[in-house]
Image: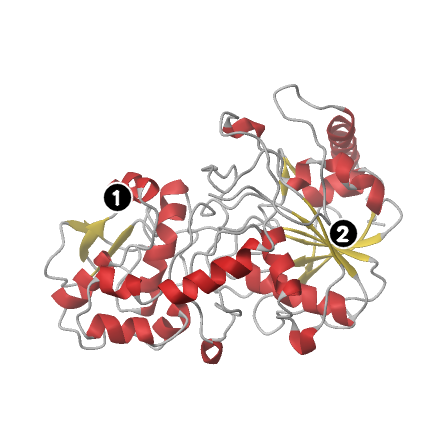
Amino acid sequence: MAIYSNNFRNFIFFLITACWAFYLTSCKPSSRISETRTGKVSGNQAVASESFNEASIRPGAERTRQYFSRIHDKRVAVVANPTSMIGNVHLVDSILSAGIQVVRVFTPEHGFRGQAEAGELVNNSTDALTGLPIVSLYGDHRKPDIVDMQDIDLVIFDIQDVGVRFYTYISTLTLVMEACAENNVSLLVLDRPNPNGFYIDGPVLKPEFTSFVGMHPIPIVYGMTMAEYARMVNGQHWLKDSLICDLDWVEVSAYTHSRHYKLPVNPSPNLKDMNAIYLYPSICLFEGTKVSVGRGTDSPFCVVGYPGYPDGNYQFTPVSIPGASLKPPYMNELCNGYNLVPYVDELLENPGLKLDWLIRMYQSSDKTGFFTSFFDKLAGGDALKQQIESGLTEEEIRQSWQDDLKKFRAIRKKYLLYRDF
């Protein structure tokens, strides 16, 4: 159990979170649909119609009546970060206030309660609010080891993903599944909507390009939630030595893959709004080039450019700011490029990776040193870079993906929990 101090501040905190947990487990707002299903269900789920508004969607973490009773006698570890919220209360605080024993917290890139920057070292620490030990799963220690898994019956995984292969939370999920399988510990995924779950696109990763920004043969945009993805990792035997994780999940109510879901909490410091989240699958490829994606500005992953680019209509100057204080590319240098926010509506109407921006900037540059060694890891192979360098059009490049995407769709279909687009 977490050890609370006797000072007044922590006493008030305990009362507030206890009241919140009572509300969650006792009340069901009339605007939300009935909670009827949870994990270990096979096949596709026909959920609420498209007439339900966004407020009717309830992430798995909010459906506490579906899992609190199942974990009340367990020694629990939680994989969490700042997105692991139930309303305005963190999942860990809610679990503790319900009298459930939390042994430790695992946290991936960006930290537990704070907003650690991309690439910033996240060290093991102690949560000042609860006294719980926090084990970092970023840097050199990305997978829980045998010591980390001691005295644990169950790991709860609750992190908001954005549905893109190189967004590393799905890599953390795979490594946590592997650790659970190796140590005979169960895993419960509290599912959340995928804000980019309404399409599939991009090259499928080739095995020889496996890395932390791409561990499995999936396209850049794969159209699955965390629970669906975990089911696929298990079902396709993608864990080391074909291990199988004892997996369970709590589904999102009223969610379908054709719905556009606005995240209530930013998933990471440089994805500051839905424009950035929708543009991220296409814009992040620029991180493997000499082009800035706007880190150090108010619009990261919404603008692209670099000093001296000859064909832009937008200018920005990266500076050291919270979320990008670790010397962002071209800090204090004027960059020429493009503001891509006006294209978001078009992207939502016609979903897919947008390569025209990348192709245009490559062709307008002097081409020397345009791509870095990181690009092939992001792309999941060396074909995309070669296609751009050879002058292929976006349509020609997209056509080269179709056979692999067809095979992936057939695999993906087996593990869906929600109605497809």
* Quarter occupied by residue 219: bottom left
Give the percent coordinates (x, y) of residue 282: 33, 56
Residue at (61% x, 60% y) in the render: 232
**Pointer 2 residue:** 131
Disc 1 marks which amino acid? Tyr
| Residue 356 located left or right of residue 112 | left
- In the rendered image, the residue lying farthest to the bottom is 208
* Quarter occupied by residue 388: bottom left
**Pointer 1 residue:** 343
Give the percent coordinates (x, y) of residue 355: 26, 59
| Residue 101 located left or right of residue 279 | right
**Label 2, residues with CA under 10 Å away: few <14, some 14-19, many ≥20:** some
- In the rendered image, the residue lying farthest to the left is 310
Precedes in sequence: disc 1 or disc 2: 2
Image label count: 2
Give the percent coordinates (x, y) of residue 421: 46, 43
Colouring mode (rainbow / by chain / secondary structure / one colour) = secondary structure
Q: How far apart, in angstroms, are the residues tagged by discs 1 and 2?
A: 46 Å
- SS type, badge 2: loop
The answer to whether one can see residue 206 in this image is yes
On residue 370, which mark appears? Answer: none
Residue at (80% x, 53% y) in the render: 76
Give the percent coordinates (x, y) of residue 176: 67, 64
| Residue 12 located left or right of residue 326 | right
Q: In this view, does 53 lie above or below 123?
A: above
Of 372 and 19, nearer the camera is 372
- SS type, badge 1: helix
* Quarter occupied by residue 239: bottom right
**Label 1, residues with CA under 10 Å away: few <14, some 14-19, many ≥20:** few
Disc 2 marks which amino acid? Gly
